Image (cartoon, rainbow, N blue to C red):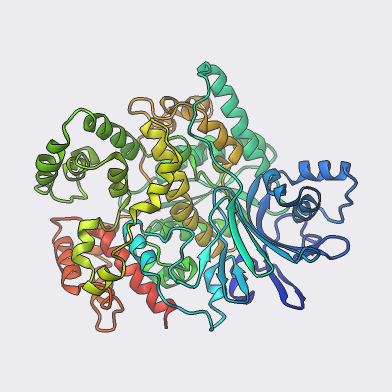
Amino acid sequence: MNDTLFHRGPDGEGFFIDSNIGLGHRRLSIIDLEGGKQPMSNEDGAIQVVFNGEIYNFLELKKELEAKRYRFRTRSDTETIIYGYEEWGEDFVQKLRGMFAIALWDARMKKLLLIRDRIGKKPLFYHLGKDRILFASEMKALLVDKSIPKEIDLHALDSYLSFGYVPSPMSIFKSINKIPPAHIAVYKNGHFSVKPYWHLDMGNVASHKPEKNVIEELRSLFDEAVRLRLISDVPLGAFLSGGIDSSIVVASMAGLMKKEPVKTASIGFSDKNFDELKYARIVADYYRTDHTEFVVTPNALEVLNDIVWHLDEPFADASAIPTYYVSKMARQKVTVALSGDGGDETFAGYINRYYMNRLEDNIRKKIPDSLGKYILNPLSKVFPMADYLPRPLRLKRFLSNLSYTFEQAYFRDMSFYFLPEMKQGLYRPEFKVAIKDFDAFDILGKHFEVNRNPDVTTRVQYVDIKTYLPEDILVKVDRMSMAHSLEVRAPLLDHKLMEYAGTLPSSLKLNGMESKYILKKSMKNRLPEKILYRKKQGFSIPLAAWLRGELKDFANETLFSSKSRLNPYFDTKYIRQLWTRHASGRQDYAYPLWGLMMFELWQQRFLN
């Protein structure tokens, strides 16, 4: 199991084995290179810890614990977990500010704790058997045990075909689950329980402060989040996409790292509609960073098998490919990279999604239900799915959404791969029968129930933070960076910063048609206007064109080979229809086709 995770920690390994308990650890040395080896214990060895991640406020916690007469033997952040647990029990996790997956064994209490960070930056899988529990940072480590059944969870597969990922606590296998973000699991005397320890409150808005005050407070919190993430005993740099979020991270780093230039890495494409390198260069030149670039081509096919292996589960977000390359490139210079992840969800950066959700809801409230159901929805079927039109002109989805509730319309927006009506054509009868009582909407619906804020933008942000962010964005970043033994830190996902942003009215995030309104204002003196106020481009690849061109033969072989494992679940004739329509250029089915391809490639890699 430990060897399987070598890429997550190539600098060393460690084991604790005592009777029926075994802990293993692979180390990526970042802080206290000599003294931070794991597993780590307290003085009498009764508490043993292994953990993946970083505790950014460990120096502050160390000072607090030393005042209570705890004696530290290392300079490592791991030791604060041990003594924090001794002092505060399970509540110690409330004190942690960082990203982490923690396993803590308490020999006195005969108790195992499994803890995942608040936002879900670090993964934690487990298999709960009749008389044992196995756990690991990646699913492939559990699969080393050949006795674990590899039966596909059809509910998980159905969810994947909606969202392009398998949402927690499910995994693609019935026998394996994930600890959800912000949860702690306790295994004691054969009993297993999972409970939340943190909630992001976005249900209430704080009293309106003057913008000037918010700008000052926001800038201070952001710089503190960046400063905490600069603690490292190894070389450190940043991803730089040319977008607002990564650019403000680099700007803050440049202000804090005055002795040396920030090392930055950027990815581009030969297709100018997807290329942002010129914007990344503007920021790199502005702050005189030590800058490196790489252009991704369809030759990415050569690394696809490696990407599928590192992703663990079927995963359809094709931006994993450039993330893989930028991580590989950054690792040549640094061991730690800061990123801009989280800015879109925290400050309403997905302008098309958030603005259209709000617009649709305003219209929906003014029209009779019958108009949406009997006129607008049928009318939407006239319009094609076209990848060459700006979103406001893609009337198909807009007209269709007006015939659904706000929550259902959002679900359809987030079903990037297969809408429910498409699944009816795709699924074989046996598959339909097997999942007849399951609705992928409920994955999102349970979070809508938690946040009843009447503001549409706030509710959508909350559900994004609970689903799309940890299950798609952070999975992609963690697996692709760890594939190259690179640690990625995200200041905009600092929970103190997110809690503060959660108290701000949505008008300070999405102001009219301007996204990230208050974040941009707080950073106005740090970046050129052409960067700060440029149109959002998104981190994606020219997938539709690749599938019609350079990847056409590969895609055709993957989908329609006589050895394909898609046939037990899906109607091949329906897939052929999607393929023909896409290849003709008349309609864009790149996402559903890629989703099926990635599921097929995953089966070839993990079920053989």
Quadrant assignment for the N terminus: bottom right
Q: Is residue 355 above or below residue 341?
A: above
| Res 349 seen here | no
Q: Residue at x 41, y 37 (%)?
A: 459
90 left or right of 549 in image: right
Q: Quadrant of residue 597?
A: bottom left
Q: Quadrant of residue 224?
A: top right
287 left or right of 276 in image: right
Q: Residue at x 40, y 67 (%)?
A: 314
Taking depth in this image into account, of 542 and 362 the one nearest to the observer is 362
Quadrant assignment for the C terminus: bottom left
117 left or right of 459 in image: right
Picture coordinates of residue 519, whole percent (x, y): 49, 30
Q: How many marks?
A: 0
| Res 549 seen here | yes
Picture coordinates of residue 441, whole percent (x, y): 33, 52
Picture coordinates of residue 438, whole percent (x, y): 33, 61
Taking depth in this image into account, of 331 and 514 the one nearest to the observer is 514
Q: Residue at x 52, y 26 (%)?
A: 522
Picture coordinates of residue 417, whole percent (x, y): 29, 57
Q: Residue at x 57, y 68 (%)?
A: 126
Q: Is residue 4 above or below residue 387?
A: below
